[in-house]
């Protein structure tokens, strides 16, 4: 079978790295031939109208001769009619369309607000809101309803797709896999940045700085931990982020709490080898994530800790609870409170490598989950 992939790739994007890892594992396979469409959605969405149309026409041309068009979907990738064009391209080529949905529709505001009164303006505003929601549905949800198969990573995405009118018989769950990290560089950056002493315990957050990731909670948790507990914030602002202010807010918090000697922020980390090396300088990875947003999203940053065999502590988001139900690999707090985060961190063994993390990566490695992905390709072609 031949699969053309419409996805971010060769760039600073976790979704792109996710799909690149699958293609690397599947490269020796005699059963499937994979290729990325050369233009990333992140490039296409920024093109002038004429170049945008030409790029999407070329996608439609290139999918001819392929059995499957596999789209990696994130709401921010497709701000125009890319998904509708992808549906049309697959149909015209006689190819199956598979979409991996990385964020649930639950993050979108699809509900029409109630009319605010009976004045002419209230009726006009209500009419406009209904028209906007219909346009949003046609642009972003209708193409998902037209896909031959939808792949999700968590139950929330399944529920929200069904609520949006997607046939549940077309939805499949694929566990977000973890790499088996073996080739690790030596690093002293964290130890030097935090002036780590023999009895220190170094916590870390991993990934791009984002309000939903609770880095502020990790910083505040230090105030309830002994002075030998320190925090490495491994990551910086995503180059495409529009919320650079969060960086200043975090550094202001460190200063206000008097934690300048106990918190070190690396800033943007260029590659996975450097990232893995710094993670392994630490003792416990922490994920005090927002409970609402991360009920809709499965965190790829979590798999970085598991791939590096790290003991891990997290807030009890729905997606983290689901992972723990598969393999108990995370120590979860009882509530979304940084005092509880400090309490669980203090009782978590700093044993490395973590047996729980190893158990997850052995069961849900890319090598094993790629077999599940191949089975879904076969199913789509047989349907």
Image (tube, rainbow, N blue to C red):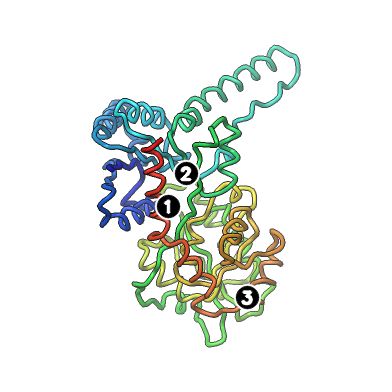
Mark nearest the camera among 2 and 3 is: 2
Residue 234 seen in the current view: no
Residue named by callout 1: 372
- Mark sitting earlier along the chain (2/1): 2
Position above or below: 182 against 22: below
Q: Residue furthest front?
A: 382
Indicate the quadrant containing the N terminus: top left, top right, bottom left or bottom right.
top left
Query: Gap between marks 1 and 3, in whole Å?
Result: 33 Å
Q: Residue at x 45, y 70 (%)?
A: 308
Q: Which mark is residue 15?
A: none
Side (left or right) of 121 relative to 240:
right
Indicate the quadrant containing the C terminus: top left, top right, bottom left or bottom right.
top left
Residue named by callout 2: 151
Q: Which residue lies furthest to the top in this view?
A: 120
Side (left or right) of 270 relative to 334:
left
Residue named by callout 3: 348
**Tally of numbered tags:** 3
Position above or below: 186 against 198: above
Query: Gap between marks 2 and 1, in whole Å?
Result: 11 Å
Residue 248 seen in the current view: yes
Assess disc 3: are there few (<14), some (14-19) or many (≥20) residues with their C-alpha within 10 Å of its C-alpha: some
């Amino acid at each position: 079978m031949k699969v053309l992939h419409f996805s971010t790739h060769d760039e600073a994007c976790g979704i792109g790295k996710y799909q690149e890892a699958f293609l690397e594992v599947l490269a020796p396979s005699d059963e499937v031939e994979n290729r990325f469409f050369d233009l990333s959605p992140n490039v296409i969405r920024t093109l002038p109208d004429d170049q945008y149309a030409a790029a999407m026409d070329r996608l439609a041309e290139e999918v001819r001769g392929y059995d499957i068009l596999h789209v990696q979907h994130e709401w921010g990738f497709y701000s125009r009619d890319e998904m509708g064009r992808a549906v049309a391209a697959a149909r015209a080529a006689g190819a199956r369309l598979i979409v991996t949905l990385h964020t649930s529709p639950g993050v979108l505001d699809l509900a029409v607000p109630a009319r605010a009164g009976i004045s002419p303006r209230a009726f006009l505003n209500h009419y406009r809101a209904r028209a906007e929601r219909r346009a949003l549905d046609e642009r972003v949800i209708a193409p998902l309803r037209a896909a031959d198969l939808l792949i999700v990573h968590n139950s929330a995405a399944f529920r929200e797709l069904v609520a949006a009118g997607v046939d549940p018989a077309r939805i499949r769950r694929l566990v977000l896999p973890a790499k088996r990290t073996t080739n690790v560089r030596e690093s002293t950056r964290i130890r030097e940045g935090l002036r780590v002493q023999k009895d220190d315990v170094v916590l870390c957050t991993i990934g791009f700085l984002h309000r939903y990731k609770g880095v502020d909670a990790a910083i505040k948790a230090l105030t309830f931990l002994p002075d030998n507990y320190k925090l490495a914030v491994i990551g910086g602002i995503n180059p495409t982020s529009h919320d650079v202010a969060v960086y200043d807010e975090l550094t202001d918090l460190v200063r206000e709490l008097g934690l300048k000697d106990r918190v070190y922020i690396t800033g943007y980390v260029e590659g996975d080898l450097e990232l893995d090396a710094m993670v392994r300088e630490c003792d416990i990875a922490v994920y005090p994530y927002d409970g609402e947003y991360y009920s809709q999203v499965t965190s790829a940053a979590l798999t970085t800790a598991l791939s590096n065999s790290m003991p891990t502590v997290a807030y009890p988001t729905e997606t983290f609870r689901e992972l723990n139900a598969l393999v108990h690999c995370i120590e979860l707090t009882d509530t979304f409170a940084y005092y509880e985060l400090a309490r669980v961190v203090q009782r978590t063994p700093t044993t490395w490598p973590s047996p729980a993390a190893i158990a997850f990566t052995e069961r849900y490695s890319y090598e094993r989950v790629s077999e599940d992905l191949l089975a879904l390709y076969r199913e789509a072609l047989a349907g």
